[in-house]
């Protein structure tokens, strides 16, 4: 099923990578642009293809990368004719289109969540209940807790799956703010309801989530596969 999902999003990612550079090449010829400038869309095509090939199992990264790639392609296309007018509009249009296409592709991979994702190499982002901006990224070899210390400060403590201890679903009785061990100022606000407790050095992470059983099974399965 995961393989089918990956096949299904290939057209989206192909558009993200190739459409902007191809339009840039076509526009160069139609508008009698500077021919050596064709190296720019060619470079964007190469860099975009390489990036999405390397990060094909990390759909969380796709939208931002697609927006940047689209914005750069838009800047090139817009620079070919009345750049002070068309370039900003092209950057906005191409960047937005890339972000939307990549977001849709990522959702097709991750939603709805199914148990077979645990057996794949897909990095699964798991948002916390009641804590905006807090999520657990479950990769093939490691888990990452993504949280914010402030408006512009993000921390990402990483633990190899081989170092992960017990993973279990727990029930939180009351709202509390817990300190994340080993990460300075990062705290996690847990709300009443199900949560997952993950033993990591030098303590434990607790992530409130209504799908605690699924998350516990996901982490445990990835740990088993990682050996």
Image: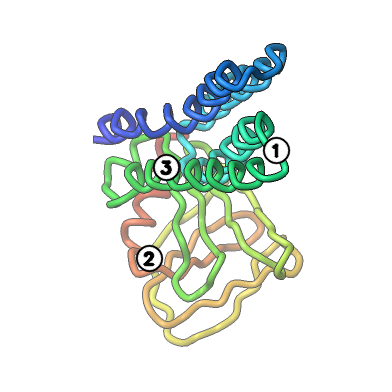
Q: Nearer the viewer, residue 51 or 182?
A: 51
C-alpha distance separating marks 3 and 1? 25 Å
19 is higher (above) or lower (below) than 36: below
Residue underneath mark 3 = 101
Q: Is residue 227 visible?
A: no
Disc 1 secondary structure class: helix
Q: Earlier in the sequence, mark 2 or mark 3?
A: 3
Disc 2 secondary structure class: strand
Q: Nearer the viewer, residue 97 or 62?
A: 97
Q: Provide residue 178's location: percent of width, then percent of height.
A: 61, 76
Residue underneath mark 2 = 169
Give the farthest residue toward the right.
Answer: 184
Q: Provide residue 106's location: percent of width, then percent of height.
A: 40, 44
Q: Residues within 10 Å of mark 2 (few under 14, many from 20)?
A: many
149 is higher (above) or lower (below) than 227: below
Q: Residues within 10 Å of mark 1 (few under 14, many from 20)?
A: some
103 is higher (above) or lower (below) than 133: above
CB of mark 1 within 8 Å of CB of mark 2? Answer: no
Disc 1 or disc 2, which is closer to the eye?
1
Name the residue located 32 percent from the left edge and 56 percent from the top edge.
214
Disc 2 or disc 3, which is closer to the eye?
3
């Amino acid at each position: 099923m995961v393989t089918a999902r990956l096949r299904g999003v290939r057209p989206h990612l192909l558009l993200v990578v190739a459409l902007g550079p191809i339009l840039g090449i076509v526009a160069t010829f139609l508008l009698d642009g500077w021919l050596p400038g064709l190296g720019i869309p060619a470079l964007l095509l190469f860099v975009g293809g390489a990036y999405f090939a390397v990060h094909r199992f990390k759909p969380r990264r796709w939208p931002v990368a697609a927006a940047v790639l689209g914005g750069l392609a838009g800047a090139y296309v817009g620079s070919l004719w009345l750049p002070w007018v068309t370039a900003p509009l092209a950057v906005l249009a191409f960047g937005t289109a890339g972000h939307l296409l990549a977001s849709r592709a990522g959702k097709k991979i991750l939603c709805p969540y199914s148990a077979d994702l645990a057996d794949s190499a897909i990095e699964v982002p798991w948002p916390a209940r009641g804590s905006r901006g807090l999520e657990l990224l479950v990769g093939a070899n490691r888990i990452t807790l993504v949280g914010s210390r402030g408006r512009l400060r993000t921390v990402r403590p990483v633990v190899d799956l081989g170092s992960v201890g017990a993973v279990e679903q727990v029930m939180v009785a009351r709202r509390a703010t817990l300190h994340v061990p080993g990460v300075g100022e990062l705290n996690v606000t847990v709300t009443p309801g199900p949560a997952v407790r993950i033993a990591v050095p030098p303590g434990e992470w607790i992530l409130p989530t209504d799908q605690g059983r699924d998350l516990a099974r996901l982490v445990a399965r990835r740990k088993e596969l990682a050996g």
